Image (spheres, rainbow, N blue to C red):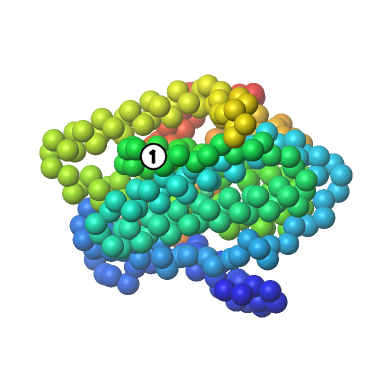
Amino acid sequence: MPQHGADRAALDVADSNARQWTSSVAGPMKPGSDVHRREMCRMFLETFNPYRPAVLEWPHLEPDALQRIVSLPIWDIAVQTEGKARLRMAAYAATLAESDVREALALNAWEENRHKEVLTRMVAAYGIPLESEAPYVHPKDTEWAYLVTGYSECIDSFFAFGLFEVARRSGLFPPELVDTFEPVMQEECRHILLFANWVAWHRAQLSWWQRIRFKLRVAAVWVFLGWERMNLARTLDADGNEHTHKRNFTVNGAQTVSSTPTSVRELMTLCLTESERRFSGYDARLLRPQTMPKLVRFALRFMRADDRK
Ligand SMILES: [Fe+2]
Ligand SMILES: [Fe+2]
């Protein structure tokens, strides 16, 4: 969609199409059935938002807002995560026999690259220094790499939805900047919606022993991601220098993007409500990612209302 001079109404239609979708097929949609596969893919293709990073305008920032953004410790890891997600999704998509699933996953990979482009352009516009990127390596085990990326997005997006809302409410960032990132946030919601449905569909295609193997793999992915998030991620850049990043940015991040202190309980509650709000526009017969909302709801039972970080 050419967006130079594109009228506001056309952009609004594209934006609202990306947020709500209901299948034209009547009746139940049994997870794993052909109709479920077809409709999850159709949801993904029909909610595609054709915005173009090249024509996004980056608003002028007052010195304190600029400083706040430059100092967020997330830009390197964000750019690299998008690059890695793109490669891993594309690698797995290429192995698939079903053309509609392959097309949906390939589009997901393409959108990850568009996220990377949005971030790269923003970083350049505000003069944020980035470390050089290590070469992206094609995964040997494409299914494992896709599972790690998919569940990783389920965790990161859940917290990002809440943090984004904290940042929006705080007023510390210009509304135009928040608006620019809004479609990226909603796209991550579509990505994990597709992923949750793909997991259910994929599992249903397996024989009983393959299903046991798959369940063990998924459990191993969660253990791996839990370990990864509790540690510092160490990466080597293209020149062989080691960099460390804090991956557990969520709670510290809330203090960075807001001037009022946010308790863990408030933040987790906001993550839950924002997650529900973002998914609410999509056909209720499609499955939602379950693990993070369940874990957080469980944890909230043990948190006192005045539990401040
Ligand atoms: Fe992304
Ligand atoms: Fe994504």
Under mark 1, the amino acid is Pro
Q: Quadrant of the C terminus?
A: top right
Q: Quadrant of residue 41?
A: bottom left
Q: Nearer the viewer, residue 253 or 273?
A: 253
Q: Position of residue 58 (x, y in %)?
A: 75, 57
Q: Nearer the viewer, residue 208 or 82?
A: 82
Q: Position of residue 37 (x, y in %)?
A: 27, 59
Position of 35 compared to 174: left or right?
left
Q: Give the residue displayed 42% in from the left and 45% down from the top.
A: 88
Q: Give the residue displayed 50% in from the left and 62% down from the top.
A: 19
Position of 130 compared to 103: left or right?
right
Residue 255 against residue 30 in the figure, above or below: above
Residue 230 against residue 255 in the figure, above or below: above
Residue furthest left in the image: 208
The residue wearing badge 1 is 139
Residue 121 against residue 149 in the figure, above or below: below
Q: Position of residue 113 (x, y in %)?
A: 53, 53
Q: Quadrant of residue 76?
A: top right
